[in-house]
Image: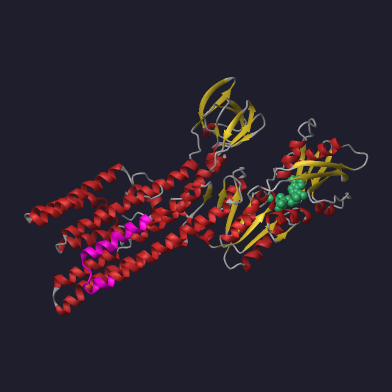
Amino acid sequence: MGKEHNHEEHCHCHEEHGCSCAYGHNHEGSQNDLKRIIFGALLFVLGLAFEHFTEFNISLWIYILAYIIVGYEVLISAVKNLFSAKFLDENFLMTISSIAAFCIGSYSEAVAVMLFYNVGEYFQGIAVKKSRKSITDLMDICADTANVVRDGEIFKALCEDVKTGEIILIKPGEKVPLDSVVVKGKSDIDTSALTGESRLVSVSEGSMILSGSINKSGSIEARVEKEFSESTASKIMEMVESAAEKKAPAENFITSFSRIYTPVVVILALIIALIPSLIFGGWSEWIRRGCVFLVISCPCALVISIPLTFFGGIGAASKKGILVKGGNYLEALSKASDVVFDKTGTLTKGEFGVSRIIPKSGISQGSVLKAAATAEQISNHPIALSVLKAANNSGKLPEVLESMDEPGLGIAVKTDEGNFLIGSEELFRKLNIKYEKYQGFETVVYVSKNKEYLGALVLSDTIKPDAEKVISKLKKAGVKKCIMLTGDIKSVAENVAGKIGITEFYPELLPEDKVSHLERIKKESDGKVLFVGDGINDAPVLAMSDVGVAMGGIGSDAAIEAADVIIMNDEPSKIFDAIMIAKKTKRIATQNIAFSLFVKLVFLVLGAFGIAGMWEAVFSDVGVMLIAVLNATRILKG
Ligand code: ADP
Ligand code: MG
């Protein structure tokens, strides 16, 4: 089979080897496989009947026919692999052990090995299909074509060919093909493909719509903001396609284990078959024991069930709107001991309302707001978006000629009408601009024009409704420490941390301070450190944590790229779900490893001493595989 075993090569090799990239091909678990198994099983039973009740010769031919029907794929792979460096794989073991069984007259056992092996693979195929379906359901988000409006005419174009700035028409029931902004019409958008939860969002002129969501009610026209390759849908697709290649340590263990294990058991089997016979004689008995040993030792239970478990885990997470970029992250999640949160946009909604404008005396509120909006024009920080929204009707803003983004502090821009600055207290202190300090528990930003203070905007953010439960849930899941890092001021941080139940928090941090805090936390931790952020100036910490979790549905590219896990619907409580799924995955993988190795070990000893015969061998090989595969499929349930 070489299916999982050759997995590393699969994705490049599956045409030439005919080997099946478990995660990238469609034939496993198919109707044809089932027919083949049923046909093979009928012949097998017929063979047994003939063997017992009539003349023996006929049953041999029936067995051979059954063997070829159920085993030809394995045989072909084994022969093909003979010429590659890794020919000592499960195909090889299955082939020589079943042929050896034939040679010593254990015809029915030889057929049984291949038959049950096929049954195991069939179940594996179904599970892979199911898991892939949950992933692709979440992933079935790329539309192929878009209705482009050019010179008043509408025609269909491939998404790849649509440029930014073009106008597309999205009819009710259609998928949003590219990330775009509504310019005409009103509708409700279903974002469940992106978030894993059905929720309708009303959109109208000016609303951003992400590719992959579905237009439910009205026809809308939208201006394309991002090309196809940069759009949310294709970014996510790309990411998931490579997920199966990033393997968990347990998977890698199995791969390297069977690389050593297989040749060792082949040599041991040869020793059992040859050495005692040379000394004591009795060739046929020792050859039989060697064959039994070989059948028992086949590692297909592990080689198939372990990657299946992790792939299933990724599928199960997808079903909940959590994208995990690889089995390795699932394994790391299962050992999460510290969870570090960003505040804005992660624990809080990051949708600020401008609740108060406090101008310096002699200045109008409107001009403070306009100055603030001028400075925020090109920023994508949650504060910027909120300020711009609040300043929606303050007229035309002066064009930005130059800008200076100070991550974690604020932003400065140069325009025809002067230099504008907006940002935190610290920024104003740093630049030596006098300001009037606001005394309160809300986030506040200060605004200046040509280094002269104009006033402050008080911003109110709300804590996400599910954030309040997340800390106690995480503690239940075995997380030892929950920590909050934020660029915001102490009083705001204290307020949010208190409401959520976080006792350890660090305010007024610049992005680089967050990095040094994370370094320290990693050093002090005895498990894996998760960082959960919204991706806006969090990319460095996301990348350096053991598992970077991004609140990604909102569509921050930086986050989707830097993160290892993406929570599509932005709910922090999904971290708990992710950890629980990871733990279950790990538990099942461990069970399968322990169970398979234990059974094999026992039977290997029994086989070497001639106590276990060919039927016991068949059980400990394909029987155990079947059990392990069925155990692995549990991850997809519930
Ligand atoms: P958090 O760590 O909570 O996500 P950030 O590091 O993104 O916060 O920002 C920290 C602080 O820097 C904000 O509270 C704000 O005072 C200031 N700031 C950063 N970017 C901007 C901006 N574009 N406009 C105004 N203020 C900003
Ligand atoms: Mg942030």
Residue 611 lies in the magenta-colored region: yes
Residue 214 lies in the magenta-colored region: no
Report the front residue among 221 and 396: 221
Task: Please indicate, yes or no, whether residue 251 appears anywhere in the rendered image.
Answer: no
Report the front residue among 386 and 560: 386
Instruction: Give the vertical position of 91 relative to 378 (above or below).
Output: below
Q: Quadrant of the N terminus?
A: bottom left
Position in image of residue 304 (x %, y %): 36, 57
The residue shown at (54%, 22%) is 154
Report the front residue among 577 and 95: 577
Q: Quarter-wise, where is residue 7 in the image?
A: bottom left
Position in image of residue 407 (x %, y %): 72, 51
Answer with left or right where residue 7 lies relative to residue 557: left
Instruction: Give the vertical position of 425 relative to 258 (above or below).
Output: above
Answer with left or right where residue 185 lies relative to residue 32: right
Secondary structure character of the magenta stretch overall: helix
In this picture, which residue range is highlighted in magenta?
Answer: 604-630
- Residue furthest toward the right? 362
Position in image of residue 513 (x %, y %): 71, 59
Task: Please indicate, yes or no, whether residue 574 appears anywhere in the rendered image.
Answer: yes
